[in-house]
């Protein structure tokens, strides 16, 4: 029995020295590493928050700049559109004036032709209605 006790003690010392000691040290090192990483992540959360705020500010500035550029482009396009519309309106107004003048001239010509035809018709009607010796 004393030999078994000595073997048991020897086995206990050997296991502690070669098995449980290294495994315990490994577990302690792993635990320390995980705790350090967790602490660094907690410390980085403030930095991440700062970076996120900076990114949001940059994004807002970029959006504002883009909106400004869009507004400038719209203003330029509106200006160009108004200029083109004005030019086309002038062309159309000039063509309309020309056509109205042509219609007025044609109307005047038609009325003058109509007046001469009315005079001829009136003389013809009077000539048929009145006897030949009487003048109107």
Image (tube, rainbow, N blue to C red):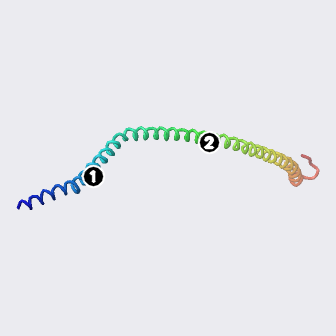
Q: Which residue is mark 1?
A: 26
Q: Residue at x 26, y 51 (%)?
A: 27
Question: Looking at the image, which is closer to me, 115 or 120?
Answer: 115
Can you tell which of label 1 and label 2 is closer to the viewer? 1
- Examine the rendered structure and indicate whether residue 72 appears above or below residue 29: above
State how far apart marks 1 and 2 are (Cα). Answer: 66 Å
In-image side of 78 versus 65 (left or right):
right
Q: How many marks?
A: 2
Task: Report helix, strand or loop for mark 1.
Answer: helix
Q: Which residue is mark 2?
A: 73
Quadrant including the N terminus = bottom left
In-image side of 79 versus 90 (left or right):
left
Q: What is the crowding at mark 1: few (fewer than 14 residues within 10 Å), some, or many (at least 20)?
A: few
Task: Report helix, strand or loop for mark 2.
Answer: helix
Looking at this rendering, what residue extends furthest in the front direction? 3
Find residue 34 and report its horizontal and vertical position in percent: 30, 48
Q: Residue at x 42, y 37 (%)?
A: 50
């Amino acid at each position: 029995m004393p030999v078994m006790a000595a073997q048991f003690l020897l086995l206990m010392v050997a296991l502690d020295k070669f098995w449980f000691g290294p495994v315990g040290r490994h577990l302690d090192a792993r635990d320390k590493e995980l705790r350090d990483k967790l602490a660094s992540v907690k410390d980085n959360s403030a930095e991440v928050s700062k970076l996120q705020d900076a990114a949001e500010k940059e994004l807002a500035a970029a959006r504002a700049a883009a909106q400004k550029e869009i507004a400038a482009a719209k203003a330029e396009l509106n200006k160009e559109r108004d200029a083109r519309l004005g030019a086309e309106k002038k062309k159309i107004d000039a063509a309309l004036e020309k056509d109205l003048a042509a219609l007025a001239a044609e109307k005047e010509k038609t009325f003058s032709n109509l007046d001469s035809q009315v005079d001829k018709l009136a003389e013809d009607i009077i000539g048929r209605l009145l006897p030949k010796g009487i003048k109107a």
